[in-house]
Image (cartoon, helix red, strand yellow):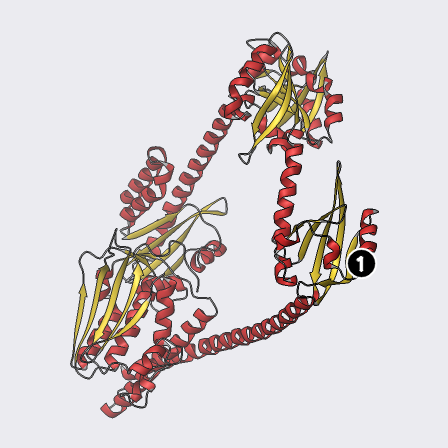
Amino acid sequence: MATSSQLETAIAQIIAINSTVSEADQEQALSGCVSEALGVESVKIRSEVAQGVNSLLDYVLNTKRPYVDNELSEYSSFPELTGYWSKGQKSCAVIPVMLSGRVVSIIEMLSRKENLFTAQLIKDATHLSYVIALSISARREESKSTRLASYFNAAFDSPVPQMLIAGDGAVIRFNPAAASQFGSPDLRGFKVEELVGVTVKEIKEKTKSRREFISRRGDKNYSIHASDTGGNLSYIVARDVTDKEILSWATSLMGQSYGAGIVLLDPELKVTYATQSMKRIIGYDSSLTISRNIVELVAERDKGAFKDAIAIAQKKDTSGTVGMATDKGIICPINFVISKKNNGYMMLFYDVSAEKYVDSMVVAFSEFLDSSSDIAMRVDQLGYIRYANHAVESALGYDRTELLGKEISLLYPDGEVLERDLGYARAGKKIDNSYTFLKAKDGRSVEATNSIRFFKTGDSMEYVIIARELESKRVMKGLEETIEGQQGEIKKLQGTGELKSQFIYNISHELKTPLTNIIGFSKLLYSGDFGDLNEEQKSHISTIMDETKRLLDMITQVLDAAKLESSKMKLDLADIDMKAMVDNSSIKALEESAKNNKLEFIWKVDPMVPLVLADYSRIIQVFVNLIGNSIKFTKSGSITVEIKTKMPKKGRPTSIECSVIDTGIGVPEEMQHRLFQEFYGAAKSKNNIKQEHSGTGLGLSISKKIVELHGGKIYYDPREGGGSRFWFTLPIKGRRKPKTA
């Protein structure tokens, strides 16, 4: 429990942190302050909280009440608490930091002491949480104000005319672009109505229904955009669009043009206006070109010539051709005319790449036809084949090159049908799926359907014929239907498997609760809480506890297998110290079991093994499965656990290697390939020993899936002279994002 002076000191430190520590370090500094004041080893303050992080935090967020568990165990209410318990923690308290009825942060405290979090300590922590809430809120408001100021500073550096207007319409701040546009070095004191011909009230009314509107004052037209900054200020963008209005007739003429447009430039060659055709030609939306120097959009090789043209335009209109760099890095040639205006330049342009585009489309079309599985041919107006794709070789037996220059009638035994279809196509009609026969090189008839189009480009005319050979298509369709039927069966089997997994998961979960109760009451009976027992009775109760515990372990394995199969298992990744695993309670229990069976237990870890990103409890589970198997199948000798860095031939090590080695009976060669299959265990072999210890056959398969979830591999090696070596690898960096099975 903290004293009054300690709390006062902590409050002073929290207030100081708000002004002396950066926002990035605020959480860590506040956590240390609370830890020191309350005497709690581990404190974590989460200033960014949201639903879905984990079930414990969701509970606190929803109830807005502290949650305390002073006796963590494997039966704790939330999986996060069970995870803390497996890492040696004994007590946990989670306190919401409230402000105006809203959770703004969460204090999470852990201790290796039981019953640490008394009512008084929680009360003290709650008092500190109020101060923390105010501190976090103040810091956020400060950050918000700083960002707002930065926004205005950045905006006022823009070449677009901008002003801050007071409630009475007076200009209180403006940028250089506004001063230049309105012809005064100091606009302060001017009313916005004097500048753009509309009052603040009218501006607010007009911008309620639309983002932007045009205001007229004298012979000037202004595009007005306004936003409310809060309080009594308005932020206004007012651009002179008089030239754009004058050019509206020209842009309307070019509105539907894909190859012509207009660009207005200021004296520094920065774009002040561009028609939407700019996007069609070079890929940039006209709004993205505003304020950019037009020279930036010119291809590097043409920049010098373009600047020379600008210099000539000072005296007279000039024209030329330059390449413009598109958004995809392609150079697009355009013709342009530049005229000097009072406030800059006007540039008219049009695209000269249309013919090149048509040529490229012809090439692309030929490539497309060449990749088709149907027969594709281009035939000139006299009926001679000018192109044939690869499909004619497999369907008709001709080399594609030997057909070039041949009459198309060579491939059609029924000339009347061909002439009819070509005539229809020449008249502008579409021929689709016309039934016919083609003649193969070996003389056989090939059943097919024709689709024909007639194209005319300038003086050039040609037919494009697509012929679909039907027999192969029928075979393909039959295969597709067979595959679809098999896919349906696969889906049914998958559905059945999912139902089976869910059923096993549900049943196992239902069995786990009563078994836990049996163990609990058996312990009470054994300890004499319901009366003294004689030695024989204690022996029977001990047997009940052992067998129930074994059954509970088997159910846990079935649950894990169901989770893995239904992709429900999640990894809780953290940096873990492999050298410290020997002190885990489960490992200690296995060590004691080995010694009770007269086996030597050795745990060897290379001191150079680094921290590994992994799920601590799941890696312990793998070790428990492998070491437990070694104990079952080893009559005498030793069990050795080795952990070392796996050294590559070149570069830095990227993984570690963990081995469990025993001097037991080993695994027969004919059984080794099935070791990691579900529901298969070495103990089930009729030639093996310890039939009484055969389990679910899931331990090794679960271990394999857990290791693979971490990005590692698991292996089995027989040892010369008897015994087994099970070993697995884990990547040092692990999977940075939590992986779900």
Name the residue: 72% across, 19% down: 247
Task: From the viewer's side, name the closer residue of 695 and 80.
Answer: 695
Name the spot of residue 147 as percent of width and height, x first.
47, 31
Name the spot of residue 738 as percent of width and height, x first.
41, 57
Name the spot of residue 23 as percent of width and height, x first.
38, 37
Name the residue: 69% across, 16% down: 242
Number of labelled discs? 1
**Residue 21 visible in the displayed image:** yes
Task: From the viewer's side, name the closer residue of 639 and 351.
Answer: 351
**Quadrant placement of the C terminus:** bottom left
**Residue 528 visible in the displayed image:** no
In the displayed structure, does residue 62 sit left or right of residue 621? right
Relative to 230, residue 91 above or below: below
Relative to 403, residue 226 above or below: above
Task: From the viewer's side, name the closer residue of 282 and 363.
Answer: 363
Q: Amino acid at mark 1?
A: Gly
Name the residue: 37% across, 72% down: 702
Name the spot of residue 449 as percent of width and height, x first.
74, 61
Name the residue: 82% across, 49% down: 429
In the displayed structure, does residue 536 sit left or right of residue 680? left
Task: From the viewer's side, name the closer residue of 343 and 508.
Answer: 343
User: Residue beneath label 1, please?
Assistant: 415
Residue at disc 1, secondary structure = helix
Relative to 141, residue 121 above or below: below
Instruction: Locate residue 540: give its quadrant.
Output: bottom left
